[in-house]
Amino acid sequence: MKKITILLSIIISLNIFSQTEQKVIDRIIAVVGKNIILESDVENQYLQYKQQAVDYNGDIKCKIFEDLLFSKLLLDQAQLDSIEISENEIEDNLDRRIRYFVAQIGSEEKLEEFYGKSIAEIKQEFRDVLKNQMLVERMQSDLTKDVKVTPSEIRKFYDEIPKDSLPKIQASTKFQQIVVIPKISEKEKLQVKEQLRDFKERIKTGTKFSALAVLYSEDPGSAKKGGELGFVGRTDLVPEFAAVAFKLKTPDEVSKVVETEYGFHIIQLIEQKGEKINVRHILLKPKVSFEEFNKAQRRIDSLHAIVLADTITFEEAAKRYSDDRDTKFNGGYIINQETATTSFTDEQIDPALAYNIKGVAVGNITRTFRTKNEKDQDVLKFVKTQSKTNAHSANISTDYKIIQEMCIATKKQKEILKWVENKQKNTYMKIDKSYSNCNFESKGWVK
């Protein structure tokens, strides 16, 4: 099926911080409304495609150029409609991207060294670029926000799809779980809090917070950086941590001991910029005592026996007795964090779970086993392999949601194409003759 390129497929995937050392002699190759396209815009993206070995059947530069024309057309409309993007939205987006690239390259220092600029300078350089991208995304979303499909449209769409064009669905499995989290004794909690208070006293007498974080913090992500988190907003932090961190007013001020779902912390303010703060923290996790672990083991074994005996359904047992808040109220179904569904491909199954389900037939439950949850807590659980689907081509009976999403995407593409055709007629456009012979998907670019 022929599709007009939806710009977001390029915009979201583009690394706006990726720069090439190969310079081109720049010139304007298109004007759309009040917005221009430079030859370097095409060349830089072309080099990225080459580096990523993108396979495209056609003139890749013409495709890139048309995507850019489309983005400028959307940007022109967003400007005419006075669509606004708040500074907080831009800052949050920049911070997310900076955090992503810091994670990829290893540290903020390495990122700054790579670009030869400070983090603040990198953010400032790309602020306008990102703002325009966000305007384009907002405009495109506004144009298609009312698109809906009926069941009859979905059925008609499915019937008309060439069967060899249907997406291939990987084999997947659904799991249910019942979890018991061993309790932490009050004695252990008091010991951990006392240790953090001792750290706070040592900091007052000259010991560096960062040195203690490297030596003792049980947050592996920040400990090696002296406990530093980098600039974050309230919503990036768990509520209890954020409430205490944002009350710190003076650089180097150290908080009281704060408890979160991850353990106990002390926090030191480094710097605050508006609604963003940079802090260090030390995390200590209370340990489960031998006695409490044995109590939890007896409890999970008892639940295992009850479910095996069919005296209660797995779903009801999860609802009544499981300690995992994320799954107990949905029948114990484990959520795939990558897809936000309950289905897991073989590659997505946690290694500990994969080991324990080996040889367990669909509909049966595993033995009880010890593992770690997403908060790095020791937990005990048993799992039921609820269902398994073999690899297949998508079909409307088992993959209705996928077919529905395909139908909606196609309808949105048609709406966008219709809008582009109308917008082209009423927008000033000038395209360099070197691109006038491109085989564009939308024919109205060249007038």
Image: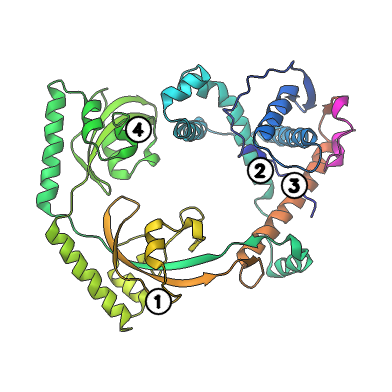
Which segment did they paint magenta? 433-447
**Which of the two discs, 1 and 2, sits closer to the camera?**
1
**Numbered tag placed on residue 9 in the rendering:** 2
User: Image height check: is 63 above or below 37?
Assistant: below
**Numbered tag placed on residue 364 in the rendering:** 1
Amino acid on which disc 1 is placed: Asn
The numbered mark, 2 or 4, whose residue comes first in the sequence reads 2
Magenta part, dominant SS: loop
Mark 4–mark 3 distance (CA, rounded to whole Å): 41 Å
Q: Quadrant of the C terminus?
A: top right
* Percent x, y of residue 320: 29, 72
* Percent x, y of residue 238: 33, 44
Determine the secondary structure under disc 1: loop
Badge 3 is on which residue?
A: 416
Q: Residue at x 77, y 52 (%)?
A: 414
The numbered mark, 1 or 2, whose residue comes first in the sequence reads 2
Q: Residue at x 86, y 26 (%)?
A: 434
The numbered mark, 4 or 1, whose residue comes first in the sequence reads 4
Badge 4 is on which residue?
A: 229
Q: Residue at x 75, y 47 (%)?
A: 416
